[in-house]
Amino acid sequence: MDLLLYIIMPVYGLIVGSFIGVCIGRVPAGEDIIRAPSRCPDCGRRLTPFELIPVFSWLALRGKCRGCGVRISPRYPLIELANGLLWLLCARCFATLPAIITAALALSLLLAVAVTDGQTGRIPDGYCIALAVLAAANLFVTRAPFDALPGAVVLSLPLFAVYQISGGRAIGGGDIKFLAATGLLLGWKLILLAFAIACVIATAIHGVRVLKQNASHKLRLGPYMAVGVAIAMFVGDRVVAWYVGLLTMYN
Ligand SMILES: [Zn+2]
């Protein structure tokens, strides 16, 4: 079973990663992601099955369109590769099949959120809805509504107040929807941890960027929150157990 999973998961991860690459290009523009066939972004030529094999096609064609020779961004094979590795990591780190599949699908959505927000400054509603549906389905497996339901509001509700007071300047609406959906998925303890991790990484990286460029740079939270949620998914339970142990050590 284990060996089979270690083969199947990265392969499916590469294929889903290819779909994530399509979503990243099309979702912000409001284009169809299911029915419209893949085309060269430059000459519009429809891609053949040979050109749709994850990572391999890009390498075989040396990153160029076979029709017009325009350079195809290495972003596509990199996203496919990253997603394949994340899915392999899920097979390694989670015990049950439902947990592995939930984590793998969540990580693909997090990857899409991180890249899309990093590029456009927006988190499309579609990703938040997909994460919320995944979290709701996961409730049937974990049967922990008293952890998950407070998780959906513990951050999104206070931050929605901040959003209203600041007129949307302090935090984006997409960030709040994202935190509600991932909070439902992680539960209240882990989403608090995820947000804390995101804030620490964002302060460090964004701080250096602002200092280096000597200019104010609008902070896009999505990539940092996606990383925080991913870290909390893998090691959150252990961090929370360690923290609770620390608090109760002297009692
Ligand atoms: Zn072309």
Image (cartoon, rainbow, N blue to C red):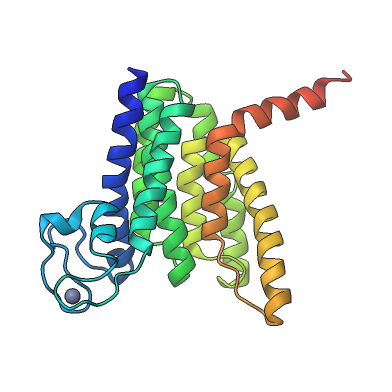
What residue is drawn where x is 74% and y is 30%?
Answer: 243
Q: Residue furthest bottom?
A: 215
Does 212 sit left or right of 14 as displayed?
Answer: right
**In the rendering, at what x and y percent does residue 4 appear?**
30, 23
142, above or below 102, in the image: above
What residue is drawn where x is 71% and y is 67%?
Answer: 207
Does 23 sit left or right of 66 as displayed?
Answer: right
- Is residue 135 at all visible to an observer of this figure? no
Q: Residue furthest right?
A: 250
What residue is drawn where x is 47% and y is 53%?
Answer: 178
Q: Nearer the viewer, residue 50 or 127?
A: 50
| Badge count | 0
- Is residue 68 at all visible to an observer of this figure? yes
Does 238 sit left or right of 53 as displayed?
Answer: right
26, above or below 212, in the image: above
The quarter of the rendered structure image containing the N terminus is top left
**In the rendering, at what x and y percent does residue 46 appear?**
10, 67
Q: Quadrant of ligand 1?
A: bottom left
42, above or below 98, in the image: below
The quarter of the rendered structure image containing the C terminus is top right
**In the rendering, at what x and y percent does residue 223 appear?**
52, 58
- Quadrant in the picture for residue 30: bottom left
